[in-house]
Image (cartoon, rainbow, N blue to C red):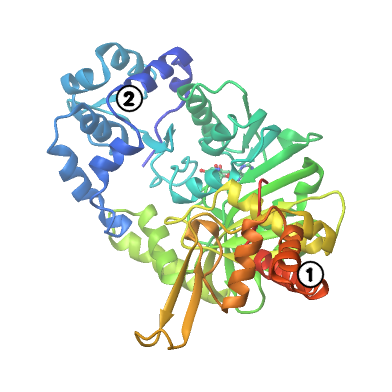
């Protein structure tokens, strides 16, 4: 299927795109509205959802449902309905540029309108492959959530920005943002999306990865590189394939970032790393970035080869016929031959500090579709690991440490008797990226004490002055529990 022409989109002025965004918001075209009309099919596997989603939308005559059909589902609506939902004036402005088109007496957009947080993002549908610009699905959303910095930045870069979703979000948090992509079509859609979302501090450049930003450095570099392994017979798709094994592009980029990061510059990559029988992907990443940077990998549970091959084949051939079967089997055979056992979705974070030893940390998370690790949380983990790596007791004792908000403690007894042995468990919320831990009563009390004190040093004071503990023992206990807490995530550095 040929891709729709994008050149005409650039003839539609920024004022029209903004008027279009205002109209969409006025009819409730936002995350809440879209979920309200499109939520019921979530229980189905993705390739199976379309008919029931359409059925649901076609029953409604509200402007939002009509707009969703024409703009998100490639489902033509009568022109009179389109004019009522979007206004006649906007329809007349969007038709000549090719954002809307007439098809069999109906009006429809050949593009896909996505809603990400409060952004509207125009992309291609994925089926055509080739230079199609990928939609803002769960992986893009995970990258966006993890990329948001805790403080305003001078500069940020999105490599391979596609439709520009993360770059547009970052434009709210940085003075200057650059997005690069080798695919001119992606850069055109990213320009449309910048206009649609009223962003003016985003520079969009066509070119091969870092070539368009030669000699420039950034406080933050974010990227979701293509990371799928390419079987030789599969047709090219710019957004998808990261090499024969899949991780070649990601590893090369991570290795080349050094000269493009400012002195404390950070990189946040969303990558599904292939898990090989022979080695660990963590070692591959460490080898790529070299020995001096900090490396934090937040990993979701592995995706099985069954799921991976089926999902990518279904994206390619949503009609789920013979071509779908061929693609899925070819992918499975390719991964088998490479001894890839599974795919591991990760947020791979590379950070640089002016002093202190390098470290590597791997943190487990729930599937990113359920829990999106936020930039704030990632900053807290980086701060904890940095404090531990400094191995400086005085610094540790002076830092305010807190239990993650909404952590609960449960007490279980084998029998309903106060004398039965009890099990105490601390359960941080899944957003804290810290596992539940069974603790003895003394450790739990020390964690509570540290949490309630302005610093672990004050907790030692309390133990000595109010509980009469010997100073040396109090210090040793508090230091040990503070370290264990930071390592496990049960304690986090406050105010990062
Ligand atoms: C997986 S998509 C991610 C798109 C977007 N960042 C997102 O998260 O939605 C990978 C992107 O890398 C781009 N890309 C592929 N090869 C590239 C290259 N050699 N130089 C720059 N960008 C490239 C693709 O065009 C595509 O937009």
In which quadrant of the rendered view does residue 104 lie?
top left
Residue 311 occupies quadrant: bottom left
Vertical arrangement, residue 169 with respect to residue 408, above or below? above
C-alpha gap between disc 1 and disc 2: 60 Å
Horizontal side of 201 relative to 329 (left or right) equals right
Camera-side mark, 1 or 2: 1
Q: Position of residue 221 (x, y in %)?
A: 68, 42
Q: Which is more toward the observer, 65 or 252?
A: 65
Q: Nearer the viewer, residue 328 or 431?
A: 431
Which tag, 1 or 2, sits closer to the chain's start?
A: 2
The x and y percentages for residue 272 are 55, 60
- Quadrant of the rendering where the N terminus is positioned: top left
Dot label at residue 24: 2
User: What x and y, as percent, mark residue 78?
Assistant: 16, 25
> What mark, if any, has residue 312 been given in the picture?
none
* Structural crowding at the residue carrying mark 1, measured as other residues with C-alpha within 10 Å and reported as few (<14), some (14–19) or many (≥20): many
Up/down of 130 relative to 490, above or below: above
Q: Nearer the viewer, residue 33 or 189?
A: 33
Give the total number of marks visible in the rendering.
2
In this rendering, is residue 145 above or below 324?
A: above
Residue 378 picture location, percent across and down: 62, 52
Which mark, by number, is residue 475?
A: 1
Badge 2: residue crowd in 10 Å (few <14, some 14–19, many ≥20)? some
Residue at 38% over, 16% down: 19
Would you say 359 lies left or right of 312 here? Answer: right
Which residue appears at 75% of the width and 47% of the height? Answer: 257
Q: Is residue 40 visible?
A: yes
| Local SS, label 1 | helix
**Ligand 1 quarter of the rendering:** top right
Residue 175, picture quadrant: top right
């Amino acid at each position: 299927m040929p891709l729709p022409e994008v050149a005409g989109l650039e003839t539609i002025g920024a004022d029209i795109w903004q008027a279009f965004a205002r109209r969409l918001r006025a009819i409730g075209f936002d995350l809440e509205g879209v979920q309200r009309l499109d939520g019921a099919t979530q229980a189905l596997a993705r390739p199976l959802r379309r008919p029931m989603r359409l059925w649901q939308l076609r029953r409604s005559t509200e402007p939002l449902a009509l707009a969703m059909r024409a703009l998100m589902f490639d489902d033509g609506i009568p022109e009179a309905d389109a004019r009522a939902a979007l206004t006649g004036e906007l329809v007349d402005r969007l038709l000549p540029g090719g954002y809307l088109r007439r098809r069999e007496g109906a009006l429809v957009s050949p593009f896909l309108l996505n809603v990400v947080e409060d952004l509207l993002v125009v992309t291609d549908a994925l089926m055509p492959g080739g230079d199609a610009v990928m939609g803002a699905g769960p992986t893009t959303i995970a990258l966006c959530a993890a990329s948001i910095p805790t403080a305003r930045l001078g500069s940020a870069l999105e490599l391979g920005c596609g439709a520009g979703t993360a770059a547009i979000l970052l434009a709210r948090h940085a003075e200057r943002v650059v997005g690069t992509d080798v695919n001119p079509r992606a850069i055109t859609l990213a320009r449309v999306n910048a206009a649609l979302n009223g962003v003016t501090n985003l520079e969009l450049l066509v070119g091969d990865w870092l070539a368009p930003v030669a000699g420039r450095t950034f406080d933050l570099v974010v990227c979701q590189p293509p990371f799928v392994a390419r079987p030789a017979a599969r047709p090219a798709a710019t957004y998808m394939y990261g090499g024969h094994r899949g991780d070649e592009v990601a590893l090369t980029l991570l290795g080349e970032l050094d000269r493009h990061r400012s002195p404390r510059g950070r990189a946040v990559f969303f990558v599904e790393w292939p898990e090989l029988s022979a080695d660990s992907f963590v070692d591959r990443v460490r080898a790529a970035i070299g020995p001096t940077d900090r490396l934090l990998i937040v990993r979701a549970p592995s995706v099985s080869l069954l799921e991976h091959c089926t999902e990518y084949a279904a994206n390619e051939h949503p009609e789920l016929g013979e071509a779908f079967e061929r693609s899925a089997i070819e992918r499975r055979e390719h991964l088998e031959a490479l001894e890839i056992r599974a795919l591991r979705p990760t947020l791979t974070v590379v950070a640089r500090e002016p002093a202190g030893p390098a470290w590597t940390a791997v943190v487990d998370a729930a599937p990113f579709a359920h829990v999106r690790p936020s930039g704030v949380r990632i900053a807290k983990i980086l701060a904890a690991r940095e404090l531990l790596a400094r191995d400086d007791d005085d610094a540790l004792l002076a830092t305010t440490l807190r239990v993650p908000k909404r952590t609960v403690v449960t007490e279980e007894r084998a029998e309903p008797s106060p004398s039965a042995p009890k099990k105490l468990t601390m359960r941080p919320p899944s957003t804290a990226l810290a596992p539940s831990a069974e603790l003895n009563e003394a450790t739990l009390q020390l964690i509570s004490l540290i949490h309630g004190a302005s610093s672990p040093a004050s907790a030692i004071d309390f133990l000595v002055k109010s509980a009469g503990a010997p100073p040396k023992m109090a210090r040793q206990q508090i230091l040990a529990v503070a370290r264990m807490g930071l390592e496990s995530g049960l304690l986090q550095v406050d105010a990062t």
